[in-house]
Amino acid sequence: MQKTRVLYVTQEIAPFLPESEISSTVRALSQGVHEQDKEIRIFMPRFGVINERRHQLHEVIRLSGMNLIVNDVDHPLIIKVASVPQARMQVYFIDNEEFFKRKKTYTDDKGKYFDDNDERAMFFCRGVVETVKKLGWTPDIVHCHGWMTAFMPLYLKKMYAEDPHFANSKVIYTPYEDEFDGSLDTKLTDKLNFDDIPNEDIEFLSSPEAINLNKTGAQWADAVSFGSETINSELSSYINSTGKPVLEYQEADTLVDMHQEFYEKVLSENGVLAD
């Protein structure tokens, strides 16, 4: 019997970025699921702060070389890979000189969020989809972590809705407490319109603040899990109102086992998993 395949799409994972709630959670979860006999792939952005030499990143030539159009502009897609030796796992990195060379993750030296964070997120999510297709690897579960992955459920359910590669994939979206302040580019809906995604599918993003980005991720996902013990109450209420399967926040000692159970429930299209 073929192993269940889980694709982790995350904005952070340890040890490539400093430890945070999201980087530590994704590392522990992916490693635990991998060790419990599921086949996994992990993707994250290749932020310029990542030390390529220390972590031995190298370009995967056979996967690189594509161009992705974001807001009517061509951007070369570069794929790199590195190993987590202690865990016997590989991590794929989505790279692009314009979006990810800068020596910061989300903000500049003054703490201001980059004006193009929306396009960076769009490029990252599109890059993951196209690379997974090129790998010829079909995931059963696509588990998205953090606001930078919020476009992933939308793309899979709309832009790639007719793509047989993801036809049977179940998408889980996990928001965290670590949201950004302010707003993404107010022209975000116009950029998504360019990808043939109509305004009625992205109503939340007419005001592209963190809560609405997370609502969009939850809106188009098949299920939701909470990555933080404390989640914005408006977001939590919205998610619970959708009637989708929900996994509440899990401490480290239950994280892997409860997600394993949740994955099986989502794949079998069962209902809400309680505490």
Image (spheres, rainbow, N blue to C red):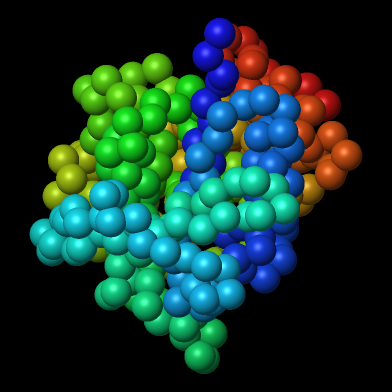
What percent of the width, then of the height, locates residue 257? 79, 28
Quadrant location of the N terminus in the rendered image: top right
Q: Which residue is at 40% across, 59% downward?
A: 80
Using the image, determine if residue 71 lies above or below residue 90.
Answer: below
Q: Give the answer, above or below, for where 111 lies relative to 66.
A: below
Q: Is residue 97 left or right of residue 47?
A: left
Taking depth in this image into account, of 165 and 232 the one nearest to the observer is 165
Question: Which x, y percent locates residue 20?
Answer: 70, 64
Quadrant where the C terminus sits is top right
User: 174 or 96: nearer the eye?
Assistant: 96
Q: Residue furthest right?
A: 253
Is any part of residue 67 visible from this angle? yes
Residue 201 figure quarter: top left
Residue at (69% x, 42% y) in the render = 31
| Above or below: residue 225 compared with residue 148 | above
Q: Say how many tags the image has.
A: 0
Residue 220 location in percent, x, y? Answer: 42, 32
Residue shown at 78% from the left, 37% from the top: 255
Q: Position of residue 183 (x, y in %)?
A: 43, 67
Q: Residue at x 42, y 64 (%)?
A: 58
